[in-house]
Amino acid sequence: MVYMDKKTEEEQPGFVGWIEYRLPIFSWVRHLGEYRTPKNLSYFWNLGSIAGLGLLIQIITGVILSMHYTPHVDHAFNSVEHIMRDVNYGWLIRYMHAVGASMFFCAIYIHMFRGIYYGSFKRPRELLWHIGLIIFLLMMATAFMGYVLPWGQMSYWGATVITNLFSAIPVVGKGIVSWLWGGFSVDNPTLNRFFALHYLLPFILVGLVMLHLVALHKHGSNNPKGIDVKSDKDTIPFHPYYTIKDFFGFGIYFLIFAYFIFYEPNYLGHPDNYIPANPLVTPAHIVPEWYFLPFYAILRAVPSKLGGVILMFSAIGVLFFLPWLDKSKVRSNNYRPINAIAFWIFVADCLVLGYVGGQPAEEPYLTISRIAATYYFFHFLILIPLIARYERTLKLPEEI
Amino acid sequence: MMSNMISSPSLQAEGKAIEFNAVYFVELLRRTLRAILAIMIILTTSPSWANDHIKLKTMSWPFEGILGQVDRQAAQRGFQVYKEVCAACHSMHQLSYRNLTNLGFSEAEVKEIAKSFTVHDGPNDQGEMFDRPGIPSDKFVSPFANVEAAKAANNGAAPPDLSLIIKAREDGANYVHSLLTGYDPAPDGFKMMPGLYYNSYFHGHQIAMPSPLSDGQVQYMDGTNASVDQMSRDLVVFLQWAAEPEMERRKSMGLKVTIFLVIFSIVFYVAKDRVWARLDEK
């Protein structure tokens, strides 16, 4: 590590030196101040710190909510209403938490697409990309379990549909599902463990975010030109240049956030979740939260349950192989005209998947979802390697 | 051919003639794709479950919009309709009588309202359950002792609790108003199940609830004519308040927060510009 001083105790006098010799906290803070960053980062590079902020907001509001929430099938729904009606500013805290999840996902998705467009996943940042993907997976698990906690109709039936996916696993599937449930249906034990895990996972996420930062700081940020930093002339200190730019980004993020909290707090949710869970009544359409819809569409595109589950997990799994599927030496799509087109078609494909994922499982949506899901894998497994091999890239600039 | 595009692959119109080459084509394609993408984002961000519904009557409600407020007169009338009509079958167990002060009822009036209900309470120090008059901190008394009793009295389907009904239905306010005023005669040849009633706005058009409102059904204290349409609108204002009692505070806080954030963003944008200007000086 660059910020680990190898000084002796005598070389670091005073109180600060005493601490520093034992715990290198001051040199760590100094590292944050001196950390050098490419000077040409665009606003797309704001999303990383915004996502960090998103996680922090979820943890703070979540801890407060848990002080008033009761994880029991008979009380969960009413305790959420108690938060909305009787707890001081409870409505604000809960809407921040519910809208905050969507905002967090929005930031993460832009962050990921940015990483793909500018080739941030390429050598030497493969592990940085992988840690990010693990964060993404864990986030999805956390969000899914959080949506179950209010114990409304969509909570209950969403939990039933998703946990049932594991029953597709041959031989042990049924056993795994009842092990997950802690019984023979989604019930009180399920709610209890989802609450425990929903509280636990964000702290594991914090640990992973730290690893993500360690991996980032090893080689520094990628940049819109995708070329390596050659000298100090290419970089500027993170502080004050990017700290202040980040704060402007926070302002814009909070403005969008505030619009939803104060004026459309339920727009991103589903009305059925204001009906208490009822195991005897199935909602007309069981729809997951918007951030799962593309994956839900891939799941439903396959007629076989096991096939759908495998394909859905592969959709994320394939991202782990991206650094080896895309072997082009040029990182940024600004210098890869063909791959840039493929990128935007891929973004469009993800939106199509998201749209059909929210529609009932019938024609013409099924056919569209099948075409879109096929294209999703065609893009990664065939198009990307071929383009990387045959594309004539543009001449890279000499310096940042 | 490609090497003349060094810094940015943006569309280059040098003089009058645009070079009609591969780079130009690629760029054109990219721009078209982005335009399609923008349209798709707009299309896909509308709520995905909103497309299989009957067209509702769309009203302009006083509680809508950035400065929306609860019309207290209408809400009080709506409470009267709930109390005298709906409460025979529908509970509102998320609300307490004390919440009614929020609608402009005085504390004394709320005490009177609460007292008119009988609350089953206990056990007392003899170990017995007992009945007592309600007090403001009691939750709204439900018409049935439990869900089973509600089902037994209503052909097996318990009437839904109304505390959250506006939030629990797509476009809730317009939906409830449409439903309450939507008891039209069934079209010719429409097969009705026994014990169900035709409603133009209910999913499947057959609803177990008979038309609950008829003209002049309640006697409004303020002399408003109690037409079905009037009662329905008053009720919706009351139910909307019941579903989101924080709505007025939320919206007024939202305005302050937005103003603060706009200033916050401008300040940091200007500060960012100033700090980054140092780089040019070097």
Image (cartoon, grey):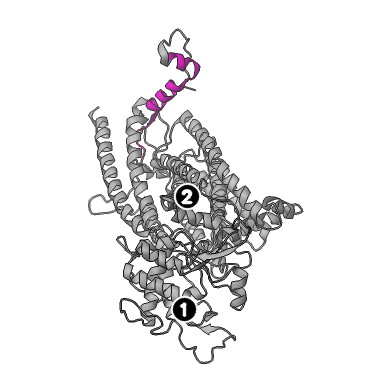
Of A329 and A94, the residue lying toward us: A94
Label 1: state its secondary structure.
Answer: loop
| Residue at left offset 33%, top offset 38% | A245
Single out the residue that lies furthest toward the front.
B126
Q: Nearer the viewer, mark 2 or mark 1?
A: 1
Q: Is residue B267 magenta?
A: no
Quarter of the rendering containing residue A42: top left
- Kind of residue sitting beneath label 1: Tyr
Q: Residues within 10 Å of mark 2 (few under 14, many from 20)?
A: many
Give how far across and how far down residue B63 sits, in percent: 34, 65
Helix, strand or loop for the magenta stretch, by majority: helix
Q: Is residue A27 magenta?
A: yes
Q: Residues within 10 Å of mark 1 (few under 14, many from 20)?
A: many
Q: Is residue A278 left or right of residue B20?
A: right
User: Are marks 2 and 1 in one subunit?
Assistant: no
- Kind of residue sitting beneath label 2: Ala
Q: Chain under label 2?
A: A
Q: Is residue A91 left or right of residue A369?
A: left
- Region of the chain picked out in magenta, as a range: A17-41
| Residue at left offset 60%, top offset 49% | A194
Q: Give the labeled residue for mark 1.
A: B201
Q: Which mark is residue A101?
A: 2
Residue B4 visible in image = no
